[in-house]
Image (cartoon, rainbow, N blue to C red):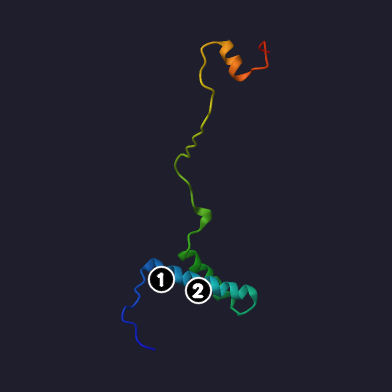
Amino acid sequence: MAARIHKIKHDDETRARIKAGNIINRLQKLISGEVEMAPHAVTAALGLLRKTLPDLTSVDHSGEVTTSYVIRTPAPVADLSEWKTKHAPGMTTLQ
């Protein structure tokens, strides 16, 4: 195989993701029974995984959450009789 002319240079974040992916794959193989790992190796893998992936239980949200609503109201009318003809054509008196 020929040597690469343009070598791939990964930044630190990409290297950390690759390492985390390898650790996750190894732990998945352990769970499925494909590989055997000593208890101290499992502990070390979980420790490395905690260093490379953020712990979602410790994420705190700071700031306000704003919610906007759209309210559709009928167009204003001049008097009650005009409203009755537009919005309540069958009613003769208001209840």
62 versus 83 height, above or below:
below
Q: Position of residue 29 (x, y in %)?
A: 60, 75
Point 48% across, 48% down: residue: 60
Q: Position of residue 35 (x, y in %)?
A: 60, 80
Q: Residue type at mark 2?
A: Asn
Q: Which residue is mark 1?
A: 15
14 versus 1 height, above or below:
above
3 versus 54 height, above or below:
below
Query: Separation of disc 2 and disc 1 at Cα?
Result: 11 Å
- In the displayed structure image, the side of residue 60 where residue 8 appears, left or right: left
Q: Position of residue 53 (x, y in %)?
A: 48, 63
Residue 1 falls in image quadrant: bottom left
Q: Residue type at mark 1?
A: Arg
- In the displayed structure image, the side of residue 5 where residue 63 appears, left or right: right
**Mark 1 closeness class: few <14, some 14–19, many ≥20 residues within 10 Å:** few
Q: Are marks 2 and 1 in contact (CB under 8 Å)?
A: no
Q: Secondary structure at mark 1?
A: helix
Q: Position of residue 62 (x, y in %)?
A: 45, 44
Q: Which mark is residue 22?
A: 2
